[in-house]
Image (cartoon, rainbow, N blue to C red):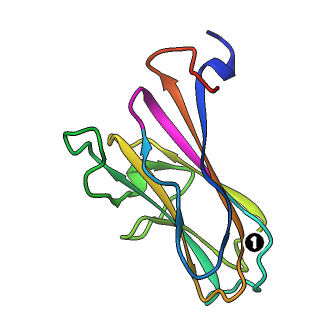
Amino acid sequence: MHDITSNIGITQCLAPQTIDSSALDSGSIDMQGADCAAVAVFIGAMGDTLSGSARIDLKIEHADDDGAGAPGSFAACTDEDVLNFTGLDASGIFESVDADAKAQKRYVVGYRGGKRFIKVTATPTGLSSGGPVAMACLTGAPHEAPVDNS
């Protein structure tokens, strides 16, 4: 298969929701059957003016299979596990969306680590009036093609 739609899986892993005081995450993304993944985080207009004290931290974590087909304990990814970002901190934060980063944007973090499950979390800090956040996962290099995107 030489067309892109047969070779990538696309999943909405977080429907558009308002982020204000609670973290939102992609849920457990199962990498089984794919060799690579990317998670796109879409951030809309915020009610607050973003700054260093009013921001949204985006982090990526991964986990092995617990032996029953579910994720074990999630641990922070490092620079070696991701594409498109460097300088991840100890908790796996790859971007702090603040005035410098500009909201109303998309952030795409690629995963190249060797674990079965990944999860991306958007954690608000200092927001009193948030805005919309959504996430989509794209998996590629499938073990079997075409991928079923129905």
Q: In which quadrant will I find the N terminus? A: top right
Instruction: Assess whether residue 88 is covered by the magenta stretch.
Output: no
Q: Position of residue 7 (x, y in %)?
A: 59, 21
- Depth order, front residue of 120/111: 120
Is 99 left or right of 26, judged from the image as shown?
right
Q: Residue furthest left?
A: 67
Using the image, determine if residue 35 lies above or below residue 51: above
Q: Residue at x 67, y 22 (%)?
A: 5
The residue tagged 1 is 102
Secondary structure of the residue carrying tag 1 is loop
Q: Which quadrant would residue 124 be assigned to in this image? A: bottom right
Magenta stretch, main secondary structure class: strand
Instruction: Assess whether residue 38 is covered by the magenta stretch.
Output: yes
Is 56 left or right of 104, judged from the image as shown?
left
Q: Residue furthest top?
A: 1
The amino acid sitting under disc 1 is Lys
Q: Residue at x 37, y 45 (%)?
A: 117
Q: Which residues are drawn in magenta?
A: 31-41
Using the image, determine if residue 102 lies above or below residue 116: below
Q: Position of residue 45 (x, y in %)?
A: 80, 71
Q: Residue at x 63, y 87 (%)?
A: 52
Q: Position of residue 99 (x, y in %)?
A: 73, 80
